[in-house]
Each structure stands twice: as structure tokens, then as C-alpha cells.
Image (tube, helix red, strand yellow):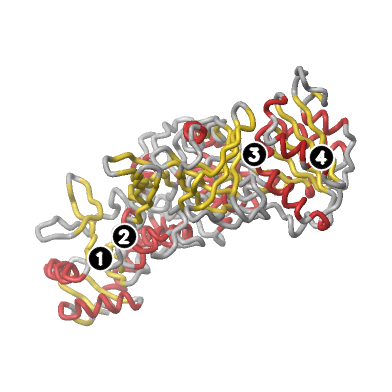
Amino acid sequence: MIEETLIPKIGVVTDIRKDTPDVKTFRVVGTDGKKLFKHMPGQCAMVSIPGVGECMFSITSSPTNEEYMEFSIKKCGCVTEVIHALEVGAQITVRGPYGKNFPVEEDFKGKDLLFIAGGIGLAPLRSVINYVRHYRKNYGKVVIVYGARSKDDLVDIDEIQNEWVNEPNMEVYLTIDRPQEGWDGHVGFVPAYVKELGLDPNMTAVLCGPPIMIKFTLAGLLELGFEKSRVYTTLELRMKCGVGKCGRCNVGDKFVCKDGPVFRMTELDELPDEY
Amino acid sequence: MFKIAKERLNELYSKIAETFGLFIPIKKGGEVNYHVWGEGKEVSLETLKTVKSPKNAFFPQSENLMKFKTEGKNLEIIDVRWDKTEKPFVMFGVKACDYKAIEVLDKVFLADPVDTYYQSRREATTIVTLACSRPEESCFCNAFGIDATAPQGDVTTWLDGENLYWQANTQKGEALTAAVKELLTEGGEEKVEAQKASTKAIMEKLPFASLDLSRFKPENLNELFEDPAWESMSEACLGCGTCTFVCPTCQCFDIRDFKTNEGVIRYRCWDSCMYSDFTLMAHGNSRTTQMQRFRQRFMHKLVYYPSQNDGLYSCVGCGRCVNKCPQKLNIVKVIKTLGGKNND
């Protein structure tokens, strides 16, 4: 039979990590034990539990990981609730990869990179950050600013504290919204922290997080002198097909599933304000 | 060009049905729609607008995509796609507007990655179009450059009081012609030319004959989006979705799972951007008001789709929405309000 993108592959959950009270990271391989398909940083996949539903998630593992894929999923709706109840060994379906990736082989190459994430917004950025770490010499200085509601809401904190902070020429700044016992790091919202840090406006920036964080962080970056054409973000809209046909994620003349989810801020300026 | 006498059309249908599944406008329960032809069915070629458009043949209102079976922890996917060994189809009597609409849908479903569900039906179908001879006042296909008197398709036909005239346009059309050749005789060019002229004369007098679309261009996207007139135009919209269901170009769909005793069936069905939960996600909704949803539908047809497809509009002027909207809202009103200066 000829290939059909809507017909998924079967994936097996081989590991589940509880990152935060409402985020779990699922490791998935095919029934043959191998990685299901190749992807680039920022691309997404449709994950489903037959009988429950299918949703689009960013692939949080790096393409350089050739053994498996990982999805960091926040429990916030009817499908993610069932996904969170899965146990190791469960079979799910996966199809993809979908969407445009971050320009890691083009515009990002040789540049100083600034990654700013809020909450579960780290999921798509983790893929790029680990890709950049793998091909470290292809990129300049890397600065990561990551914030969450509390220290318990920082996704994949082990990798950040054990690996990222030790990476040469890479700075990691963590912050939480309110003071908390056992936290001696920075306290405050991401947009304010970004301004305080007085970052070099010549860096290429990638923002990912709740819309409100993106809005205020972007304003802060522009004040610091960043250029919109060098600021990237990802959009998230309802999707069913993943290939620009079902009509749901249409904004202006773009489909987020196919023309995004990665957009330059200058591209977003040309779209009607409806995302 | 060939012809066949009107009273012998049943023989033609019967002959086609020997080799093909024949879909043709048939009156059933007071409505005319495309149904499979059979002896004794009430064919109504004269009906200008079937209630549902022929898109149903390629993009059915609901279709199964796949099945899932679970045994213990093991999940199995069963491919339920249409089997190509089945009889090919003939869609008979497709009007110029509806034919153009299939072209609009092709650009969506046959674009990479190809939708194989749509493609298999599309490839298995020979389309016989029928020229319009009595366009109605809700018709405005000419605003989109469509010639209702000479539709494209694998075969084009014209019907008058005496005969059906027949002209093959493609290889598929030639093959169908060969299959029914014994029933056809040559001739009819003059009658067809005369009908074209008289139909054109009617078209010119139709109320929507001179809609001005000149403002609907990609470069005006944001200006049109921000136009304050959307508020008043959409005020009466109930969000019922009738316009999208009767529209021959609306292609939005939903994918859902259905649990049965023999596993899970994943199906897709028509959906509507006019519905409040169309864009609803667990963490919010990008279009919360009916004005936004109303605007999305018309902006998609008149600006977004053309911007992605070399200026081709995703409206073909069939007028079904003009006839069916319970609130008398429609794309003609939108074009008149927001279109070029010559819409008075």
C-alpha cells in the first residue's frame, strides 16, 4: 500500500520520567526497538492513544539522539490526562515529523544564541539546545534563561543542573515566580529577569513559553536593542491533520503545522493577530 | 461532438452503469443529490444546484481512516483504505461551478503529502460535466471567471429540449465515450453554440453579474482583516455551519475515534470553522467570538487561499450559501461590503 501520512506508526513507551507535578517526559521507540523517524529541532509529532484522541507535541529530544524520541507532556486536557496514566511498555501511535524546524543549519550557525523559556516552553527548546551542544563548535556563546512558577515546575532540572551548567561557553540562568523554601536562585518573572541580565542584543534569540511571557519578553528584548528579524518563537494552535489540510491551525495565509511552528518575529508581524 | 436523444438517456445511464458506479443527481425525499444510479431512480439533470455538492464523492461527509485492534498491550493498525480493484466511478451532470470546486479541493488534498483517501477516489472517477442553460439569480460563477456554458471535465455535455450533446476532453473521457459509442450519433455543434449564446444572455442580467473582487488581494490581507465592517456583517450569524456543509470548496475536517466492539475506528468528517470549538485547545481558543469565526471563513476563501494558490479564489459562485443561510448572510454580501469600489 502507498504511504499515507494520517496512518501512524506504533510506538512503545520505554521510560517515563516525572519532571514536575504536571509534566512527564515519555521515551518512545518503535516496536522493533529503534527510533521511529528522524526529525530536526523544533519539529513536532502527532501522538495518539487510539480511542481517546491525537495531539501535536514538540519532540523534545535532540535529533542527535539516534536511539529514541522523547516528548515532555503537560497534563492539561483529556488526551494528556490519559497519556499521563500510561505505564512503561504501553503502545501508542506516533506520526511525523511535522513542521518547519529552527534554522540550526542556516541562520543559527556561527551565532551567539539566547534561549528563553517559560514552563513547558522548554520542551521544544531542549531539542535545539542539545543539538547545539552536540555540534558545539558550530555555534558561539549560548545563554539560557529559564523560568517556571516554582522550583518544582522546572522541567528536566536534572539535565540542566548536571549537564547544561557545565557546558563550556554556555550560561544558564534559572528563575522562579515567587520565593520558595530551598531555592536560593533568582526570583521573578522571565521578562523582568531578561532585562536585568542586560543581554548582548547581537545574539539570535529563541523564545518559547506562555503567550503572555513571550509578549513581555519580546518587548524587553526590543528595548535592549535586539532586532525582530533575529528573534524566533513557536506557535501552538489546534491541529488535526498536521499537513495543512484540515484547516484548524490556519492563521492568515499560513498553517502553523506546515509553515510553522517556528516563526521569526518579523513573519508573525505580517500575520493577522489571531494566534 | 456527439448527441443522444433525451428519451434515450436511460439507456445511456444503463450502459455506463455496466462498467462504472454511476453517480448522478437523483431526487430522493424531496431533495436532489448525487446518488448511485439504478433503474427506476428519478434522475434530475435539470436541477441546477444539488443540495450537497459533488465534493461528497471524493471527500465524503464521513469516512473511516483506519482501525485499531488491541490484544493485551499490543496495538495493531488496520488499513481500511478504498480498494482500487473496486469499480471506477462516473460523476455525471457536474456543473461548471462544482467542477471548478473540485480543482480547488485538488490543490489541498493532492498537495504534498498527498491525501491518499481523496486521491484514490479522484483517480478512479471520470467526470461528466453539464453546461448550465438556465442559471438562477443566486448564481455568480462568472465573477470568478467560470464559464457555465462550457465547463471542463473529462466529458462536457449540453442538454436542450431534444438531446444531450457530448464532447470528450481527456483520455478518461475518450474511454468513456468508447464505452457508450453505440448509443451516440454525430452532430449538435450548432445547437450547442446557440445554447451558449442564450445562456450568456441570461447570465449578464443576473443580479450578481458584476461583483467586483479587485480588493481581495494578498497585499490587502491585514487591511481587510482589520476592517470594522466584520462586526456588523457577522452580527446575525448563528454559527450553524450550514454554509460550510453546502459549500463545494469547504474542506475543513475533524479526525475522531469511535470505540466499537471490534476495536477503535478512526474516522474523519466534515467540520466547520464557524463552530466555537473548532479551534478550542486544552489551554485556550484562538477564535473566541463568532465575528472572528465568520471572518476566518470569508478571509480564507477570498484572501488566504488565493494567496497560497496563485490567486485562485476558494469560492466558485455556486450560490448555495445564498440560498441556504437561515440568516440571509452570504459571501455576496461580504464581497459587496469589502470588495472593490464597483460593488453598488
Q: Mark 1 points at which residue?
A: B86
Q: Which amino acid does label 4 sit on?
A: Val
Task: State the SS at label 2.
Answer: loop
> Is A11 located above or below residue B164 in the figure?
above
Determine the CA span between mark 4 and mark 3: 37 Å
Cβ atoms under marks 3 and 2 closer than 8 Å: no
Cβ atoms under marks 1 and 2 closer than 8 Å: yes
Give percent across and percent down for residue B179: 21, 77
Quadrant holding the N terminus of chain A: bottom left
Q: In this view, does B88 lie to the left or right of A148?
A: left
Q: What residue type is labelled 2?
A: Trp
What's the mark number on residue B82? 2
Cβ atoms under marks 4 and 3 closer than 8 Å: no
Q: Are marks 3 and 2 on the same chain?
A: no
Residue drawn at the location 42% of the way across and 44% of the way down: B254
Residue drawn at the location 77% of the way across and 50% of the way down: A133
Name the chain under label 2.
B
